[in-house]
Amino acid sequence: MEKVRIIEYWLDSAARDLDTADILFQNSRYDWCLFIGHLVIEKALKALYIRDAGDAPPRTHNLVRLAELTTAPLSDEQKELLMDITRFNIETRYPDYKHSFQKLCTKAFAEEYFVKIKELHVWLKSQITPWP
């Protein structure tokens, strides 16, 4: 039962972050919307990792690496998307990348990726539930 509670913790946290990302998008904070979107996917992957491995997930923000440690049947397109989303974590955190990332994050750019993040989040949840 403990395993189920830990999975639920990661999924609930991802859902709260998704709500936050939506608020950021609505308020034109596109770079931070995508940063939080990265956390949504990271937390969903960590829930999947817990389901598969049963122990604490690794301390990494590399979404591709996390996905590779699960049984999720990711397509090549999804793996590419994970690589793109991982960039949002790095480019939002570090000052030398932050300014150029802010310029890149137009409404259209953010909307395209935020839609993809939401779709991937739904798909990842479908891979987790129901639990074995």
Image: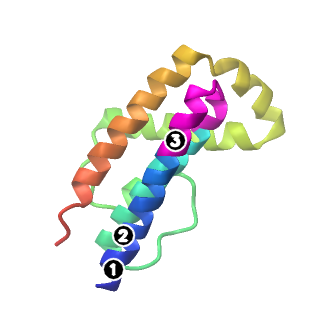
Indicate left or right for 128 with 25 as reference.
left
Q: Position of residue 104 (x, y in %)?
A: 66, 19
Q: What SS does tag 3 mark?
A: helix
Which sits in the foreground, 124 or 67?
124
Q: Secondary structure at mark 1?
A: helix
Please tell me the numbered disc located at residue 67.
none
Q: Give the amino acid type for the residue marked by disc 2 in the picture.
A: Ile
Tell me which corner region of the image, top left, top right, bottom left or bottom right, holds residue 109: top right
Q: Kindly identify which residue carries mark 1.
A: 3
| Residue behind mark 2 | 7
Circle 2: is it few (<14), some (14-19), or many (20+) Cα within 10 Å? Answer: many
Queried whether the magenta region covers residue 99, the answer comes back as: no
Tell me if label 2 and label 1 are in contact, CB under 8 Å.
yes
Among numbered discs 1 and 3, the one appearing first in the sequence = 1
Which portion, as a residue range, is magenta?
19-34
Q: Is residue 64 visible?
A: no
